[in-house]
Amino acid sequence: MSEQIEQALEIFRRFLKSKELKITRQREILLRRIFEWEVHFSAEDLEDRVKGDGISKATIYRTLQLLAECGLISEVALKDDRRMYEHTYGRDPHDHIVCVDCKKVFEFDGAAIARVEAEIAKRLGFAPMGHRLRIEANCEALRKTGKCERQEIRLG
Amino acid sequence: MSEQIEQALEIFRRFLKSKELKITRQREILLRRIFEWEVHFSAEDLEDRVKGDGISKATIYRTLQLLAECGLISEVALKDDRRMYEHTYGRDPHDHIVCVDCKKVFEFDGAAIARVEAEIAKRLGFAPMGHRLRIEANCEALRKTGKCERQEIRLG
DNA sequence: GTGGCTGCAAAGGATTTGCACTAAC
DNA sequence: GTTAGTGCAAATCCTTTGCAGCCAC
């Protein structure tokens, strides 16, 4: 796991260098905190995670953009009132289903959606560039039966 | 077409009555303008469409919420910086693919995605409640060949 | 030393809200 | 007449930006 952080850091360093940007204390700390913690987070969540490290909100927003551009994190469509991110480095493609009541988030294999994306793009002659999907559902039934085969990830 | 508007209006009236809300001049005009115009729109687009009808921005936002709650319109994930809507009454289920460069929006049949939604929900024991999807792509290839089998809908 | 980076505070921009007046029923 | 709706302006809230001083290189 910590090995994964070092790899991500190395990728980030190379990315920054390639764009003649600087490797700063703040950028390293932010990357580490992102990969150390839960998968899904907002700028505010991240701000909480670096409390005490003396990193401003502005730097957080600016660094999130860099990390997304670099491909280490991605924006995910989990909420409507703020941007949510997840770290994607070293993870398989997947999509999200969210309970509209309790806000729990589950992930599922992204192959089926990727197939649709590829086919639609092909039919239109487009070059596919990814997608943003949120399936909404109500998990009451799940709470009753307690049968769940998948990892639950609770939003903050 | 105008028949469809009258039907939608009738549904809206029933909805309002069932919640003991009032049928106002503003609400009728907004519904008509929405169904008379293009499929995709933002609150600001709608504001432009009712210029001269003396309807405030606040009323527009409040009415959009009612129409969405009532099911006559739906939010669509076409842009990140503002809410986009489309009127769904009388239309087949579909999803959207957007060119990241020219912002053109194309619609495609929603059956495949609906199948994935149903299957994932079933596997988790959730009650499926819909989804929000935006496929992103680059249509440069399309522009070169000029071969497009589908209706183009340009965002404002 | 240079040029990018940071922190701070202010600005931006879509959406929501409080309130007094108006209109539907 | 009663109750909800509207318009206006102010407030919210997330995110971005301008700028002076700071740090990586």
Image: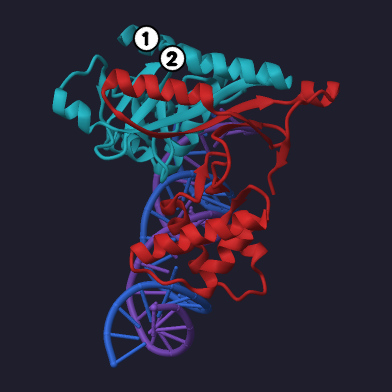
Chain colours: A cyan, B red, C purple, D blue
Q: Which residue, given by chain and number where applicable, does mark 2 sit on? A: A89
| Location of residue A44 (image quadrant) | top left
N-terminal of the pair, mark 2 or mark 1, is: 1
Which residue is found at the position 43% from the left and 31% from the top? Answer: A134
In the picture shown, does residue B133 fall above or below B8?
A: above
- Residue projecting furthest to the top: A3
Per the rendering, the mark at residue A4 is: 1
What amino acid is at disc 2?
Tyr
| Location of residue B2 (image quadrant) | bottom right
Q: Position of residue B149 (x, y in %)?
A: 76, 26
Q: Is label 1 in a helix, a strand or a loop?
A: helix
* Of residues A34 and B78, the one drawn nearer to the viewer in this rendering: B78
Which residue is found at the position 64% from the left and 47% from the top? Answer: B39
Asked whether residue A97 is in view, the answer is yes
- Residue projecting furthest to the right: B145
Q: Where is residue B25 in the image (x, y as percent from the top left)?
A: 53, 74
What amino acid is at disc 1?
Gln
In the picture shown, does residue D13 fall above or below A12?
A: below
